[in-house]
Amino acid sequence: MRARLFIMKLMIFGMLNIGILIGLLFCVSGRHREIRLSYAESESNLLVLGENEHYPVAFLGTSRGRVLSRDGNHDMVERILGGKVANLSKGGGGGLMPADVHLSFFLNQGNTVDHVIYLVDPWIFYSSINNENNDFFLKDEPFELFIFWKLIRDRYPMDRLFSYLQMITVTDWRKISRYGAPGLTDGTLQKIDEKKMEDARQNYLEKYDQESFVAYGPMVDAINRLVRKNGARITYVMLPLLMPAFPGLTEIDAFLREKTSQEEGMAYYNCASCMQDQRFYYDHMHFNKAGIEYFLNTCILPILHGELPVLDGIFIQ
């Protein structure tokens, strides 16, 4: 009897502590919301995007999508596409799971979007470093209880949870969220270094796990459901690569083509072998300003108009 009473008291004590903790987290959640920075000033999504706004287009992706908004490029993007654009891409290799977190919060804040464009990189389907073990995609984001709870539900590791909790103590958001290497998109890759390309290929191969591909594939379903639930449509675009035969690309291409054939409101285009001209890049992976402008005009703009994109003079099916 005493043992049962002790257990009940222990449970009540535990629930009270959990309740107090949730209350404290609720109080500190969203303290940043009066701060508004521009894409030119910040890598953060939460500090740039507000609430209850409508966007014709929203991008998801890694740093290869984030360059569309760095160095003042965001204004050019909106001018070319003819309207407001939300760029939810994250540097540091933000994968499918981080994309789901950012899109979920964006929509939970009452924002709406007509068309989500997911700028796909092959490695996001294979490596935990881009997904649940990504310790970068929230390092420039303020604390939000909604996001913290989603990290718990999506079974992110404890060290990711503790890392995000540390954002509560940050005060200088303008400093911590700014891009650390401005001006890169003004440059141009002078020469394709085959050794660097091979080293990169080997580096990615070491991180690839076929079982991870099976595990992360369902995240596409989760993102698609979220998009449909909010009355939008989604298009996946395999970004151009200077290494078209990138590890794992063939399998992902087949996977996304199959998904497209099964689901309404979803489209997919494989542009990996397009834009092989080095003048469109500032390094071996990222577009420069000329590349961004060309890619938007010849690929994204036609997609938004319901037409086939044309890159390097080739219609992309």
Image (tube, rainbow, N blue to C red):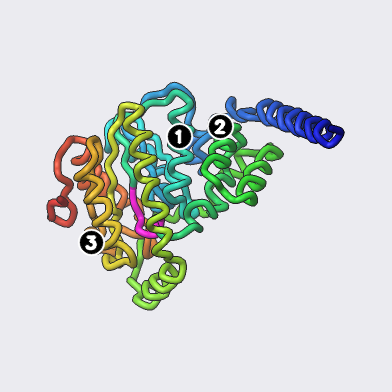
Q: Amino acid at mark 3?
A: Ser
Instruction: Identify residue for label 2.
Output: 146
Q: Position of residue 248 (x, y in %)?
A: 33, 64
Numbered disc 3: secondary structure: loop
Residue interval drawn in magenta: 119-125
Q: Residues within 10 Å of mark 3 (few under 14, many from 20)?
A: some
Instruction: Identify residue for label 3.
Output: 273
Q: Amino acid at mark 1?
A: Ser
Please give the name of the residue rendered at 37% of the width and 72% of the height, measured from the top-left corner. 197
Q: Quadrant of the N terminus?
A: top right
Q: Residues within 10 Å of mark 2 (few under 14, many from 20)?
A: some
| Camera-nearest residue between 192 and 203 | 203
Q: Position of residue 281 (x, y in %)?
A: 34, 59
Please give the name of the residue rendered at 73% of the width and 30% of the height, measured from the top-left corner. 15
Instruction: Identify residue for label 1.
Output: 104
- In the figure, residue 184 lies in which quadrant? bottom left
Q: Is residue 222 magenta?
A: no
The mark nearer the N terminus, 2 or 3, is 2
Is the C-beta separation of discs 2 and 3 under 8 Å? no
